[in-house]
Amino acid sequence: MLLTDRLLLNFQRCHRQAFLEMYGEASVRGQVNDFLLKLAQDKQRFQESLTFEQTVAQPDYPRSDWEAGGLATLDLMRQGVPVIRNGVVMSPRTDQYSFASTPDLLIRRSGVSVFGDWFYVPVDVKLSKRPKLEYQILSAFGADVLAAVQQVLPEVAWLYLKDKGWYAVDLSKVMAQMEALRSELLEMLLSRQEPEVFIARNRCSMCVWFDHCYAIAQSENHLSLLPGVTPTRYPVLQSHRLNTAEILAQTDPLYLHAKTGLGHEISSKLVSQAQSFVYQQPVLLHSARTFKAFDALPTASIELYFDIEAEPGLDLVYLHGILVVDRQRDLQQFYPFLARQPEEEAQAWQDLVCLFQRYPEAPIFHFCAYEVQTVARLAKLYGAPDGLIQSLLPRFVDLHEWVTRTVVLPIESYTLKLIARWLGFEWRNGAANGAQAICWYSEWLATGNEVLLDDIVRYNEDDCLATYHVKEWLTQFLQQQIELDLRPIASGY
Ligand code: SF4
C-alpha cells in the first residue's frame, strides 16, 4: 500500500474520501470539476513562475509511476542539484506500506546527510493566504519521509504562500499531530473500515465522490441531509437514538436540550427543521407577532437586487449585477456592470455607484454578506462620493439572514440555489454556479470568447432574479403568518 501526501490531505478533510480514494470503485468516481482543475493549473503556473539563481532540475519519469519518480528524484538528490522541482520522495517499504510525498520544491542546504555535506528541505507552494494547519501537517509528513531517505530531519519545512511568501513550518509543533493522523489513516486503510457517509455541503459539493455518497445518504434518509446536523452534533443525536428526521420531528425541543445539552435555540431549530423535512412544508421559527412588533422586510416602490461575481485568484470583482424592480410601473430592468478586463474594475465600480445614486431611497437586497463587504472594500479602494457609503450600507438587506432567522424550509442547505429551486425558480443554465463563472471568466481572458461573458451575465442576472423571487415569497409568507397569527409548530419554550 502506498500512503501519499494527497491521501493524508483527503483524510484530514474527510476520512471517507481517503478510504474511497484507496478502495472506491472507479466507475462511481466523478470528474474533478472545472474549478478545482483551474485551481490546480493556477497553482502550477504560480509554482513555475518562481525563479532561482541556482540550477533547477526536474525528475524525468513516466506519469503516475511512483517508483520511477522516487528513483529519478533520488538520483537528482545524490547529484546535489540545488533546486528540484516536482520531485517524488519515497520512504523505504515495510511489509505492508510505504510513504510517498510530492514536495513542489526540494532545496539543498549545507549539512551532513547520506548524500554528503548537503541535505534537502521540502517546500510546498500554496495559493492560500494562510498557512493552514492541514498544509503544515503535509509539510511535516514530507519532512518525515525525506528524513527516512536522507537520514536527517530538517529543522523546518517551508510553505511558500502566494500573498505572504515564505512561511517556516515549526516541525516540533506539528510532527506529533501528523504522526497521530497518519497512524489513524493507516489503521483505517489496513483494516478496510469504511467510514459512514456524512454529507456536509461545503466539504462535499466539490468532491469527486459526491454523487456516490449522496445517493447512499438519500437511500438511508441520512440525518446529515438535515441542515443543522453537523459532524459534532450527529454523534450526540445518535447516542440518544435520535437518528431519523421522523424521530427528531416528534421530539420536544426541551427534551432534546435536556438530554443532549444542545442549546435551547439549536434544539428548537433542529426540531423545526426535521418537521419541515418530514411534512415538506415551511415552518415559522418564532411567533408571527415577533415580526409585526419589531421590524418588517422592507418593500418599496423601487427595489434593487444585487449580486457580485469575483475572481479571488486575481483579487478582482469583475461583475456587479443589479436588477431594478419598479413596482409602480411594473417594470424590471437588469444592469450588468462588467469589467471585461481586470483593469476595468474601477470603471465597473463607478458605474455601480452612479446607479446607486440614481435610486437614493431604494432598498438593496442581496444574499449573504459578501456584497456589503465588497462595496465597503471597493469604496476604500476606488473612492465614492462623500456620505454615499454611510447612506448606502443601511439600505442593504441580507435575504439569507432574513430567511434563516425567520423560517425553516424542507431543503438540505440554505443556499440561494436550493431555496429558489424549492420555490420553483430555475436558472436558464442549470449547470452554472459561482465557481463555474470564475472558470468562464478565466477562459474569456485567455480566449476572448464573448459567449463566455454572455453566460456569466445571464447567470448573474438569474441570481438577481432568484433573490427577487425569494424576497417575494418570504414577504408573502411572513404576511400570511402575521394575518393568521399562527403559533410556531415547535414552540419549545
Ligand atoms: S462526498 Fe463528502 S462524505 Fe463523500 S467522500 Fe466526499 S467529502 Fe467525504
Image: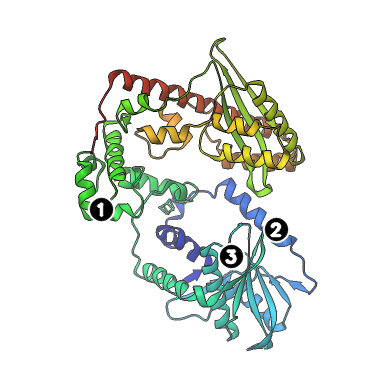
Q: Residue at x 60, y 74 (%)?
A: 157
Q: Position of residue 476 (x, y in %)?
A: 39, 20
Reading the chain from its start, which is encountered first: label 1 or label 2? 2
Kind of residue at badge 2:
Phe
According to the image, label 3 marks what residue? 64
Quadrant the C terminus occupies: top left
| Mark 2, residue position | 46
* Quadrant of the frame with the N terminus: bottom left
CA–CA distance between discs 3 and 1?
49 Å
**Lower sequence index among marks 3 and 1:** 3
Q: Which residue is mark 1?
A: 261
Single out the mark in the foreground, 1 or 2: 1
Q: Is residue 70 left or right of residue 218?
A: right
Tell me the element at label 1.
loop
Q: What is the C-alpha distance between the residues marked 1 and 2?
A: 48 Å
Check the image and tell me how it is coloured. rainbow
